[in-house]
Amino acid sequence: MGCLMFDLLCCPVFLPDLNPKKAYEYKYVGVMTIGRDRPDLAESGVRIQCSLKITGVSDQTFLLQINDLTFDEFNGIPGKSSFVTSPKLTQRVAAELTQPVMFEYVRGQVGDLQAPVEVSHSVLNIVRGILGFLQVTVKTTQNIYELEELGIHGICQSNYAIEEDLNSKELHVTRIVDIKNCREKAAVYKGMALALENNDCKERGDNTVEIVQYKYNVRPTEDGGLITKVYAEENQLFSPFNVKGGNSKLLATQEVFLIGVTDSVGNVTPSPMQNRGNQIYKFGTELNQIPLQLNKNTDPMAKISELIEHIVAANIKQVDNSRTADILQLYQLLRLVTLDNMETLWNKYLGNSEHRRWLLDVIAEVSDARVIRFLINRFQRGDLSVNEATQAVLLTFNHLEANSETVEMCKEFLIMPFSRSSDLLWSTVLLSYGSVVYRYCGTVDPCPLIAVQPLLDLATDSLSRNDEADLIRSLKAIGNAGHLSSVKTIMKFLPGVSPTVVSVSTRAQRAAVQALRHLAVRDVHRVQEITLNLFMQRNLSSEVRMQACLILFDTKPPLALVSMIASFLLEESNLQVASFSYSLIHGLARSQTPDNHILSIACNVAIKILKPKLGHLSYHYSKALHFDWFNDDFLIGKSSDIYIFKNVNSYFPSTLISKWKAYFIGRILETIEVTAILTTSILTEKQNTIQGNYLCFYQLSEWQSLPEKQPLISAFARVFGQEVFHADLNKDVIQSVMQAISPKAGKESPVWNMIENIQNGVAWHWTKPYLIFETRYIRATMTGLPIEISKYYLSVTGSTVNAKSTISPPPTDNLGQLLNADILFETDGNVRSAKDLFVFHGINTDVVQSGAESISKCLLNIPWKFSIKMNVKSMKFQLDTPPWKTRTEILSLNYNVYAVSRNIEDPAEAKMTPMMGDHMEFEENPQTLKNTTGESDHLQTKICAKAPSYATAMCMEMEAERAHYLSEYPLYYVLGYTRCAFTLEPVERNKPIDKIQIEISNGPNKDTESVSQSMKIFLSQQMSKSLGSIPDPVLIMTALAVSGNDKPEGYETTVYLTQAAEKDEIQLLVSQIGEENNYMIFTIYICVYTFQMQLQWGAECQTYKINVEAETSHLPGSNPSVNATVNWEEVPEYMQEIGKRVGEYIPGVALLQRFSQTHEKNPEKQISALVTLATSESIDMRMEIPELTVYQKEIPLPFQFFPFESNQQDEGPSISSSVRLLEIQGKFAVQLHIYIFVCLV
């Protein structure tokens, strides 16, 4: 090695260089393949072969001439298929690639390129990839070194190792480029601005692995080091999970051989050229090219019109899930047209509601300044309804590419009068603008204040106008934006954190706290300071403090801060705040997700401090429930949170929040969050017991007493962390609904107009295409062709409804006349929703596509056709529906993975080869699988549940074909064809049925009252014990299969009710019409303190029998209790087997729930449970099953129960007085006993 260093120091001829007076000829071969790197699985790829000639223009400028170009494609099984030359594609690429390109070259460093203006970026990037073989840095003082250098991938870290071949006197240079961590990396991420990066996941593993390796042979010459041979290899492994092996693999190779060196003849005079930048890859048309199809776009306007016509026609009756490719092509074409073209299309379809709706829905995916200008024109000209405008703004803004230009254009919507024409539209405009600012601030640092200034001004203006609704909207929009400069404005509405604080309502304070949520990521310490200050102000509203606590823990506070919070909670007097904070800390202490790893340790410490004081608090107080799951092998997980905010004086929650997150491929996605806020003051009175809340329902029914301006309920929803919907329900809304449906409402009611329209017959059709997400990761490869990982999730939902009604006699004055009329309502239609998920990994350019593509198609189909006859006065309802005549798929899922190849010159020759081909093919050649652990499975099954009486069957079909390597690569489980479907199918009968008839009445059914004489005898025997005769049924339900004049078949359910002074008796009898001895009877006995239930079925209801009994007691000196017993004499074998399996799980479940247990002999065929009210907020429970007894003390209740007599003076009425009160309120105590039995036992 010392000799090598001496040679390098003394002989600088090893430094790579070119002599401008010579011509160098090379042979170049570049190959890219994408597949699974297995001998029996299909792959696709491309190959470029050509000869290179490099001649000198000046001392540091050279001319590259490419000749003898061939462009080959591969699609098939390695070893069985081969590369095939595409003459048309070769001719198209050669037209640009064979034009001369000048480049600068100094001692192994490729500089700027110059090329004719007609050479596209895509072709010039291939030239950059070819010239990459000249890029090598040879140091004369080191043989192992690393440095940062510029290349096609960006400015990346390179590691070098140099070794000299003593025989050939050549240098062998090995260069490894870490393209995963580059400065100015030639890569583009799209559609992932709202998915937060999870650095903790990335430390454990990643879903992509990328590395590049070059090997050079450098021969010393008088002119410098001459590169004689280069072999380069680039690998990219991609998996949706962190799984080693079985990944989708990109393999790119380059081989360059020196053919010869000759003296140049004459001076080279290049044609006019333009400077095209340095060696770093330049993005062009590939950003607009959807990787799932490749079409010639010679006349996009004509093709757009043709596609819209075809799509509308195909979906006019029901959603056609085979038209997904057309919708994707429509997205692609609309991204190519100009604003004037869009206006032309709009004017063409302006008067056609169906075509117009489709155009509005798909044009939103243009995603740049053109579609914003298009929407501005619509708002200014008044072309859109409020409903259309709301949907268009929501879709367009949230899929918009956010940059300085689009942000400025979006501001125009904030000052247009039409935006304020509806509260919902105005709210949508504000929230959507905030979302655009958030995504824009994710691309620039620092984010300019001018982007969020309109929202800050609106908040200030709303305050000056005393407009609370607008103030809350602006604060929510500011929260969506998450701009650092908005902190001062937010603080103005938070008491105790700013010297310029203003007095606002609790609702506005709560909105201001929530506006800090995105700032918790961008300025952690500032948000922690503000929220901790709010949390520690005991004079603030408990809801504001709980919201502050929630945001505070979103910042992932360190151990010291969590310990401070725990110490503060030990002195907390507000049990709502204390309970919420403790339960939030308790849930986080058990978290398994990587982002909460350090926080969970801190929370575990806090729990040990807080548990003795706060661990006993029940669900009567505010709670935070956290559930999560994370798999360390796959690096995927999910979490869900439920937050329950309660008022000090009310059992009912004042706020309910439900939130879900997904963890995948190193990112955190806040999928959806739904919040409902009960804002009225009606529920803030003393209602801390069940009877108090019973009275509360009565108060709510008196809606006239609600406040004029204050909303009763506020609701909002967030998707991917951005609030997209906000609405208030106030007195005006309730009043308008009540007036519209009032029996006294006349022809002025909208319900009256609706009824008139249905009498004349209505046909309604609606469709909604929606690109749920489009995420793309595109980067350069050494060959100059881009590699892309993209995911497209497309949904098309549609509904078709036909309806007609006949009313006899028709109403003439008011809606109340409908109560005395015979009504016939007939309808048919369907609801269909098609959801397609595409995942692509491969090469994507405007001339060629090659890669692996997975396609998942899910279809939900709900058809219907029925008629309803009803008379409200006589309480009779009859539904008729025809039986299923054809096989109908209700839900289906199809999935497969393909090796795809497409090129723009031969679109008809596109190939989609299933990656796992026909398994029979491999059985014919077992040598292919030699020395592998491969297996092949083909599963096909069909299971049906038949209802012969109704000639209908529900079936599940499943088919799966796999070729996997189970012991090595779990990912092969999802490789191959999969199909699953749930279908409704007709069943053959001896007598075909005309219709299925379901009837509900409150009296005897003349058509079926004599079908089961033995049933009547049994009922007579049962009821004679108490009443001596069979009463009239209170309710009869029949489900019949009607076939011409034949006797109907089916089932009848009859309900009998007998009331007595001591107890009420309910009997429910289910019988099969036409079967004398096959029926089931269900009997319930109810009194104030006992509840009995008896279930009998089988022949004459004597074969099987189950008894259930629950009894309450409250003896002097003891606590109230409920004793429940379930016993049986004989049950079917399948129920015995189920009971046996459930019994095996009880010990484990009891242990997990911290129940004590003892193994002892208990009565067979019996389960009993004793529940005792230990305190007003907890119970003791003891349950006995055969051979096992489990028990637990002080189990928290989800509500506060009646106070004890010992505390009567301080806390309210006793148990006895409470029961007496509830008896007056319609035997509410009976409902209470049933509730305790069902919920607790």
Image (cartoon, rainbow, N blue to C red):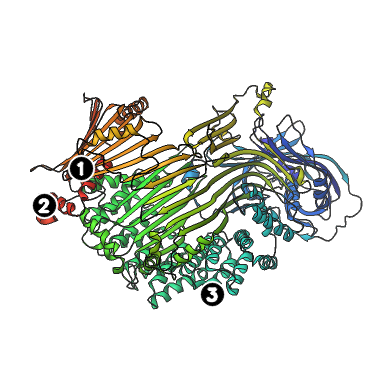
- Amino acid carrying label 2: it is Asn
Residue 668: percent from the left, percent from the top?
48, 49
Q: For mark 1, give the secondary structure.
A: strand
The Cα–Cα distance between marks 3 and 2, rounded to whole angstroms, is 63 Å
Residue 805 sits above or below residue 1093 on the image: below
The residue type indicated by label 3 comes to: Met
Residue 490 lies in what quarter of the image?
bottom left
Q: Is residue 600 left or right of residue 13?
A: left
Farthest bottom residue in view: 465
| Label of residue 1179 in the image | 1
Q: Mark on residue 264?
A: none
Pointer 3 or 2: first along the chain: 3
Does residue 982 lie above or below 310 as drawn?
Answer: above
Image quadrant where one finds the N terminus? top right
Q: Secondary structure at mark 3?
A: loop
Q: State the separation of the CA atoms marked 2 and 1.
A: 17 Å
Residue pointed to by mark 3: 416
Instruction: Name the N-terminal-most of marks 2 and 1.
Output: 1
Pointer 1 local density, CA inside 10 Å: few below 14, some 14–19, many at least 20: many
Q: Is residue 19 visible?
A: no
* Amino acid found under the numbered disc labelled 1: Ile
Place of residue 386 in the rendered image (x, y in percent of width and height, measured from the top left): 52, 68
Q: Which mark is residue 1207?
A: 2
CA gap, disc 1 and disc 3:
60 Å
- Where residue 446 sits: x, y (%)? 52, 64
In the displayed structure image, the side of residue 560 where residue 753 appears, left or right:
right
Crowding at label 3, few (<14), some or many (≥20) Cα neighbours within 10 Å?
few
Residue 982 left/right relative to 266: left
Q: Which residue occupies the extreme left position in the image?
A: 1116
